Amino acid sequence: MDYDELKLEPIRFLPDRVDMPWGSAEYILADLGFVDSLAAEGILGGNSISELMETYLERISGENAFDAYGTQFPVMVKRLNVKGRTSLHVNPDDTTAMDRYDALGKTALWYVLEADKDSRLWLGFRRDVTPSEFYEKCQGRGDVEGLLREVKPHPGQLFLIPPGTVHAAQNVKLLEIAESSELWFRLHEWEPSEREIHLEEAFDLIDFHAAGSLETQFPVKLPQMRVRKLNITVPSGVESPDGDSFRLYVSLKGSLDVDGCSIGEGGAVLVPADVLSWHLTPGAGGTDVLEITVDKIPDQEPWTTAE
């Protein structure tokens, strides 16, 4: 097969569920090594996203993403079904992650899919906290939760989780859109557990200042990604004449057909950068989707190694 001549088309991916002590994480599209999403059908069916990136390079991700991330697909989308409470985590920034671990850091968005009266998010600190105060309480000598900014989420809310922000979730369903990284550190467990705690290793990553509200709105424009929420009620044509970025569509409500590639609620279709025009056809009653892209990335972003 002449890979340079193969015409690329929209690609549907198969979800990959991983059970967790607090529920499950369903990876909708991820290029992480331990999770490597598979194309569902067509001439590329059975190929993983990492294999597609290795073969088709910027034809999949676009020149913007390829220049910054190389052959790793730049974003990850997963559904978090949290039953009970996750441990308290923190993510590193890109510079630290690259310097220490030769990996991407993690800036993330949490979109609330379902929530009830018992749902909670903990996002950063409610006030400025001293490192020693936090450390002592994580060691069991005090109330860690009392330091944290608590949010009662409701469906449709969107939260930005920058690197350095301590975070946890309880009894909620979330859609996470993030950099293609699962480099995070567990700071605290609420109940006795044998799982490893990374408090000392990650201590200098933590932002100890008061967080303020981290709720945000669509469209989201970050150096790492652009995310729009679209309500599609009639068939629509889309053009990308420059072919500078992929488009990833994730259905929040309803079905969507992208040039014959169909998904239901929670499904994902990747339109490779090589595809310059396509059609979006919603199901009956319309469709709510997220559209994820990577725009032009400025020179010398934190994950870019200076020569």
Image (cartoon, rainbow, N blue to C red):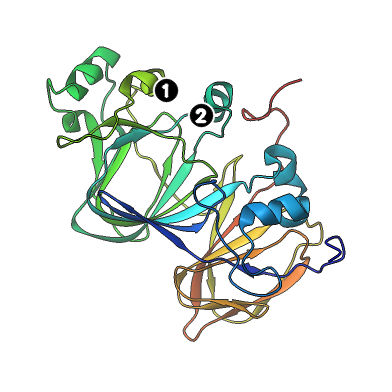
Tally the numbered discs.
Answer: 2
Q: The residue tagged with tag 2: helix, strand or loop?
A: loop
Q: Quadrant of residue 302?
A: top right
Between 280 and 127, the residue placed more toward the observer is 280
Which residue corresponds to the image point at 76% horizontal and 65% vertical from the top-left?
Answer: 275
Which residue corresponds to the image point at 51% horizontal and 83% vertical from the top-left?
Answer: 283
Q: Position of residue 193 (x, y in %)?
A: 19, 36
Amino acid under label 1?
A: Leu
Indicate which disc residue 93 carries. Answer: 2
Question: Which quarter of the image is occupied by the N terminus?
Answer: bottom right
Between 274 and 123, the residue placed more toward the observer is 274
Q: CA distance from mark 2 to mark 1?
A: 8 Å
Q: Position of residue 223 (x, y in %)?
A: 61, 39
Indicate which disc residue 205 carries. Answer: 1
* Direction from residue 256 to residue 185 in the image, left or right: left
Q: Residue furthest bottom?
A: 284
> Is there CB contact under 8 Å for labels 2 and 1?
yes
Q: Is residue 266 visible?
A: yes
Which residue corresponds to the image point at 78% horizontal and 61% vertical from the top-left?
Answer: 274
Q: The residue tagged with tag 1: helix, strand or loop?
A: helix
Label 1: few (<14), some (14–19) or many (≥20) C-alpha neighbours in 10 Å: some
Label 2: few (<14), some (14–19) or many (≥20) C-alpha neighbours in 10 Å: some
Note whether 122 is above or below 243 in the view shown. Answer: above
Q: Position of residue 214 (x, y in %)?
A: 38, 40
Q: Quadrant of residue 112?
A: bottom left
Amino acid under label 2?
A: Asp
Q: Position of residue 205 (x, y in %)?
A: 42, 22
Mark before the other along the chain sequence, 2 or 1: 2
Note whether 128 is above or below 150 in the view shown. Answer: above
Q: Is residue 244 visible?
A: no
